Image: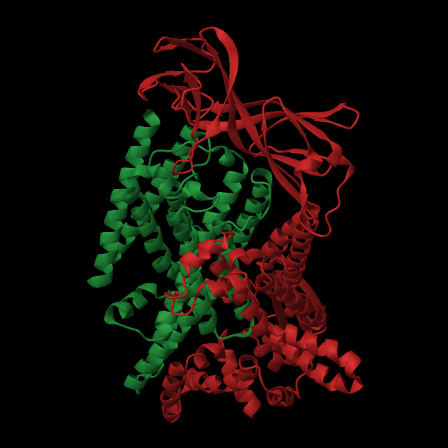
Chain colours: A red, B green
Amino acid sequence: MEALILNHAIYSKPSFRADFFFGPPLLHCSFKPTFYPGNSGFQGSYLKRSLSFTVTCRVKTPQGNKKNDGNIAKKIILSEEVPPPLVEEGGGENESQEVAGKTGKMNGVMGLVKRFPRKVLAVLSNLPLAIGEMFAVAALMALGTAIDQGEAPEFYFQKYPEDNPVLGFFTWRWVLTLGFDHMFSSPIFLGTLVLLGASLIACTYTTQIPIVKVAKRWKFLQSSEAILKQEFSDTLPRASIQDLGVVLMGAGYEVFLKGPSLYAFKGLAGRFAPIGVHLAMLLIMAGGTLSAAGSFRGSVTVPQGLNFVVGDVLGPTGFLSNPTEAFNTEVHVNRFYMDYYDSGEVSQFHTDLSLYDLDGKEVLRKTISVNDPLRYGGITIYQTDWSFSALQILKDNEGPFNLAVAPLKINGDKKLFGTFLPVGDVNSPNVKGISMLARDLQSIVLYDQEGKFAGVRRPNSKLPIDIDGTKIVIVDAIGSSGLELKTDPGVPIVYAGFGALMLTTCISYLSHSQIWALQDGTAVVIGGKTNRAKAEFPDEMDRLLNQIPEIVESSTSK
Amino acid sequence: MIFSTLEHILTHISFSIVSIVITIHLITLLVDEIVGLYDSSEKGMIATFFCITGLLVTRWIYLGHLPLSNLYESLIFLSWSFFIIHLVPYFKKQKNLFNLNAITAPSAIFTQGFATSGLLTEMHQSAILVPALQSHWLMMHVSMMVLGYAALLCGSLLSVALLVITFRKLIRIFSKSNNFVNDPLSFGEIQYVSERNNVLQTTSFLSSRNYYRSQLIQQLDLWSYRIIGLGFIFLTIGILSGAVWANEAWGSYWNWDPKETWAFITWTIFAIYLHTRTNFKSVNSAIVASMGFLIIWICYFGVNLLGIGLHSYGSFTSISN
């Protein structure tokens, strides 16, 4: 009898979750006094509704508080009359976790060798632990952006002084001993990441792979009680299960029909994709580790017309870094030039590079720019920076002279370069001369000996400028190209991980919907649940069930 | 020239409609729900949507690249994404989704208002693209990131609403806005229930209120989960395409640049949210989502305010130079 009420109660109230009522303690209190005393006066569906609260909560609490084994036992007793699927009805990863934990304990008798890894697995695959690790990683990263990275110790002595600690305790000692001055390579951060990776592996192994097995077992439900216990359930009075099957097929479900019972599902990929997400994360982590351990990096500023050997620039970053043949390649900077907008701002940097092998043969020639690097034999050459190398001038039609140009430090990130052409007696203690300043290779600003503005000239205009009797022609501005070189064996793995992660994240959004139905006389009992689109699911089901034709002559056939 | 005039006109139209819509919303919130007014505000929203679309398209044609190169443009795009999310229920004719409007409409309006108001006027001129931004990845990366932010902000706002309702910080205004959020389905059920129990009117009123509220909480919970899930996809694609782009432009796919790091923090927080969904109470995951709400703002705005790192072209400081 009790079972009957239980069914009706749940039936009258589809898609209700106990969590909402027993989540916040406030709500919990507000419910009890309202329902229990009022019960006697209530009739019809309302009574059932109120009852259902108590029932659902009893069924569902084991999911909510996942601590004691006693609850599981209770649950199994509850499901005795129902075939096995109800045990899995709990469904959540949590449950299988608990089971894994339990089996771990039971197998403990088998000896330390076997027990230890299992225990570690059980601990690592604990979801709250994994969440804690993610929070820790997030917090460390946030701290890493809050503290200036990679400065000299003196900087931290000043910024986090001992006599005036931040928040009352945070001094430079914390920063330096914990390695927070280089957070993203500090042992604490990397350790947390490794722990997170271990949790990922453990969780995939102990929780997610069993889900696949469980999902495969979830087939036909034989009793209408079990069906009506689903998150969504309904009973169609005069209908045939075949019609339901056809309608579900039309809606894209895989339908299995066996005698009076039906099982249909859609979006199974959505249930398995999270495993793919975890594996992709592991792939990215592995690739990242390989990148960190097996790369070479280096940067060089090369004036136009000069060359360098790749191997001289590249330095190893980790113990796995192995130089290759291609390191003997010589790179020649044929030309460095910039494109400008009409407003005078730089629009793009270009460097024309030639690569020569050991025999001096040109193997590759390419003009690189920002966003368009050169790749050769595992080496990538990026255009990252530029500088002013020299200014070629004619002084009173003599020359050309090459004046070395030096960068001047100014505030902000705009560059400024300057050079100086001495005029008159070079050996006197205070030499005077002409100063030339430039922001880019486009135009040179000239100042006379008193420091007064004299004029602006473009490098290839051939237009002479006369400053205090000295005639100067600016022939050319020679830039130097700032190149960054690297080899990174981890990139293919990381990219594979990226691709897999994007794909599996998208697939994870698919909702895995399952529908069970049972022909019960002339009526069809339908129950279903879904794991993502819980809000849309009842609507979709209502829409589908409306399409099922009602059998009119059913009363005669019965 | 014609483009900038057109842009000017569209900006002003959208701004004036937005101010009108805000007024209407205030009236409906404070005075009473007038159906006619509410409808006109919805029409206003659609009109604004087309204005912003026009604005983006003009800028796109005018500049030759998708207008996403600075904070102003990305804000416009953010409000455009809010409008998209807002308008989806109209196209899908899905009644259940209508309770989203209470979240998306103000978000869209305030973003649009902020972007077009005087705060950022210096930024309105379309800036030129610095060399690093001249890539096809710009479109993919920034649009995905902003779409992701928009969806995640909506979803986490729903969670914030859930927390507010759960913890009963119900001032009168809020109980009014609950009606505003009300979805027709559950309301019908309440009426049905109260009809049957008119004997015990007071009790039934109380309990139906509770019943209705828990329905609302459940709806909020499910929708925030769904929308955050969508935003998470966009965020993932955005971060990964950004990483691929960085490997083309900066020399490494991950540089621990502040913006990058914060995007990763956001990603982590919402990954936590998705994990808490499996077997924690809805309140717990709502708390995580609310944290995510703050973190998105830090990531989107805070890092730009400081103007540090490789992503500094979207910052406030770059305009002063």
Residue occupying image coordinates x 34% and y 49%? B111
Q: Nearer the viewer, residue A350 or A69?
A: A350
- Answer left or right for B267 relative to A198: left
- Answer left or right for B20 relative to B243: left
Q: Nearer the viewer, residue B180 or A136?
A: A136
Q: Nearer the viewer, residue A425 or B27?
A: A425
In the rendered image, the quadrant that contains the C terminus of chain A is: bottom right
The answer to whether residue B97 is seen in the rendering is no
User: In terms of image quadrants, where is residue B107?
Assistant: bottom left
Residue occupying image coordinates x 37% and y 82%? A26
Instruction: Determine whether A89 is above or below A309 in the image.
Output: below
Q: Where's residue A491, x and y in %?
A: 67, 46
User: In terms of image quadrants, where is residue A216?
Assistant: bottom right
Residue occupying image coordinates x 77% and y 82%? A112
Q: Where's residue A373, x and y in %?
A: 62, 33
Q: Residue furthest top?
A: A397
Q: Nearer the viewer, residue B164 or B209?
A: B164
Tag count in the figure? 0
Residue occupying image coordinates x 41% and y 42%? B314
Q: Residue furthest front?
A: A428
Q: Where's residue A307, x and y in %?
A: 66, 26
Instruction: Determine whether A389 is above or below A255 in the image.
Output: above
In the rendered image, the quadrant that contains the N terminus of chain A is: bottom right
The answer to whether residue A339 is seen in the rendering is yes
Q: Where's residue A178, x and y in %?
A: 54, 64
Instruction: Determine whether A344 is above or below A217 in the image.
Output: above
- Answer left or right for B231 relative to A292: left
